[in-house]
Image (cartoon, grey):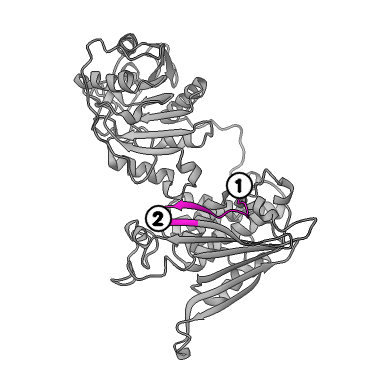
């Protein structure tokens, strides 16, 4: 897949400023790894008068088939057009959502209109010419013009014949696209957002499963132009893979944007069909959210930059950590491959840029065994993990984390069984989840934590998570362990454990506390 982006300039405003705006130096050829191959950025020409940046995406057809993006199906799970579609198809060669995703990953800062080196240039329109040699256009050149021309582009969409030697066969569904816009019409960021949305719309297919978060992506990329586009409904429907519920949600939000712009007011002031009869009560914050917020605050106070999420489940905590740039390395560990797969999808590992992908990893492993891969980290989190471990195996977990891995800080959260009487839906004498081997009182948790700290040269402090009931305490209790020395751990007769040989998953990233533990048992949802 190939795309070129050209601008012109002068001595006062050199065209080579394009390199600053794209964050890619014109004198270098750069390569970026994607889930489906290799993306290359290079400059065929770079002078003050004219500069062209080229994006070449080399798609690995085998990876495409294995990951479910080949054939004529609409994303993962789509049925191929024919039995050979997964082996003979246009995906590795014709512009599609694969190219759009690469465009968004490689030029992410430019897409957002951000340029620290030349911030004033990022907000200025510039003359642009975009060429795509092979673009699937389900709707023909007429649809290409209908999509781009309302946005200010001059469009040339030449149909590609099925075979030039046999003109009677007619044209293929591909066009050679050239779109141009003069100076003073579009910024580079706006132009890239047009391409990001409209390339997969013209192909009318996506190589990945379209979920609810695609609505937010569409609205972000379509900000400022999609609400008033005459083909808004077609764009929205095709971008969201014709999923009716998502299309309706996006259309309703776009209509609010259009009305707000027409009235020169905020969307929030338009979206108030119910009269304001006074302040409404804030909805209660779920305990899982409170727990995550408390953990993040505690981690931030430690100054940690390299963090383990042990028993990461479906990746909620890893996702939150990844949004904070102070964390340079985040590793989620879980025994459940299913949980890690869900976590990888949550984190969209396949679509992360190279820099983000280098920050995060998902590992399969059991916390009942020592693992050298977990050594050398600033902090580790065991959130709602220990209660899933059989009591006789707790010493093994204790040694693996505190005796072998020995992070500087360890955060442990676990349910407070005393608080269970406050759950109206929880029968008396029952634990919060069927997989819980036990649930500790505050005194029992403190006794265990004090023993761990004493045996392995840590200090420990305790903190409530959630409302601290004066009678029964908080719903969740947290212990913050801080290592007191840098010497070898004190084992006090602890057993010797061996590595479990866990392997890294294909898709890096994980977190959350709702699925899977580091000991071989699934955690499941919390009663809270």
Q: Give the range drawn in magenta.
A: 24-39
Whether residue 227 can be seen here? no
Q: Nearer the viewer, mark 2 or mark 1?
A: 2
Residue 16 is covered by the magenta coloring: no
Left/right of residue 515 with respect to residue 249 in the rendered view: left
Residue 313 place in picture, x, y as percent: 34, 35
- How packed mark 2 is, by other alpha carbons closer than 10 Å (few <14, some 14-19, many 20 or more), is some
Distance (Cα) linking label 2 and label 1:
30 Å
Disc 2 to disc 1: CB gap under 8 Å: no
| Relative depth, front residue between 346 and 14 | 14
Determine which of the numbered discs, if any, sits on residue 271 in the image. Answer: 1
Question: Where is residue 172 shown, x and y percent of the image?
Answer: 47, 79
The image shows residue 68 at horizontal and vertical percentages of: 34, 59
**Which image quarter is the C terminus in?**
top left
Any magenta on residue 27?
A: yes
SS label for mark 1: loop
- Residue found 71% across the figure and 47% down from its top: 118
């Amino acid at each position: 897949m190939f795309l070129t982006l050209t601008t012109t300039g002068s001595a006062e405003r050199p065209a080579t400023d394009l390199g600053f705006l794209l964050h890619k130096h014109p004198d270098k050829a750069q390569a970026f790894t994607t889930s489906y191959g290799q993306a290359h950025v290079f400059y065929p020409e770079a002078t003050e008068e004219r500069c062209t940046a080229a994006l070449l995406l080399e798609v690995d057809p085998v990876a495409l088939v294995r990951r479910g993006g080949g054939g004529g199906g609409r994303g993962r799970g789509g049925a191929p057009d024919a039995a050979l579609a997964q082996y003979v198809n246009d995906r590795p060669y014709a512009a599609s959502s694969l190219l759009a995703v690469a465009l968004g990953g490689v030029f992410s800062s430019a897409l957002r209109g951000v340029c620290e080196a030349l911030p004033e240039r990022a907000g200025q329109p510039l003359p642009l010419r975009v060429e795509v040699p092979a673009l699937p256009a389900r709707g023909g050149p007429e649809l290409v013009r209908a999509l781009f021309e309302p946005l200010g582009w001059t469009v040339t969409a030449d149909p590609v014949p099925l075979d030039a030697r046999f003109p009677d066969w007619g044209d293929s569904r591909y066009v050679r696209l050239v779109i141009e816009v003069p100076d003073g019409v579009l910024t580079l960021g706006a132009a890239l957002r047009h391409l990001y949305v409209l390339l997969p719309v013209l192909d009318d297919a996506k190589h990945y499963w379209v979920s609810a978060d695609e609505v937010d992506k569409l609205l972000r990329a379509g900000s400022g132009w999609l609400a008033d586009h005459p083909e808004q409904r077609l764009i929205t429907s095709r971008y969201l893979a014709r999923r009716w519920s998502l299309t309706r949600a996006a259309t309703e939000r776009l209509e609010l944007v259009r009305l707000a712009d027409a009235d020169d007011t905020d969307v929030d002031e338009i979206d108030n069909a119910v009269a304001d009869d006074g302040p409404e009560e804030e909805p209660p914050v779920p305990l899982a959210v409170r727990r995550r917020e408390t953990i993040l605050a505690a981690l931030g106070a430690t100054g940690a930059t390299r963090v383990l999420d042990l028993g990461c489940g479906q990746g909620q905590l890893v996702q939150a950590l990844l949004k904070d740039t102070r964390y340079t390395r985040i590793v989620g560990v879980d025994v459940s491959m299913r949980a890690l797969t869900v976590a990888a999808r949550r984190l969209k590992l396949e679509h992360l840029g190279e820099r983000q992908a280098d920050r995060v990893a998902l590992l399969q492993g059991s916390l009942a065994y020592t693992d050298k891969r977990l050594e050398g980290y600033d902090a580790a989190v065991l959130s709602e993990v220990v209660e899933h471990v059989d009591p006789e195996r707790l010493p093994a977990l204790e040694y693996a984390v505190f005796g072998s891995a020995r992070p500087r800080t360890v955060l442990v959260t676990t349910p407070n069984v005393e608080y269970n009487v406050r759950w109206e839906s929880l029968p008396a004498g029952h634990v919060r989840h069927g997989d819980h081997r036990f649930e500790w009182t505050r005194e029992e948790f403190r006794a265990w934590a004090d023993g761990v700290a004493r045996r392995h040269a840590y200090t420990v402090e305790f903190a409530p998570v959630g409302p601290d009931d004066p009678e029964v305490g908080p719903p969740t209790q947290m212990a913050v362990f801080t290592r007191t020395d840098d010497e070898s751990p004190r084992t006090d007769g602890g057993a010797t454990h061996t590595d479990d040989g866990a392997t890294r998953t294909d898709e890096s990233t994980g977190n959350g506390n709702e699925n899977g533990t580091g000991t071989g048992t699934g955690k499941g949802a919390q009663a809270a």
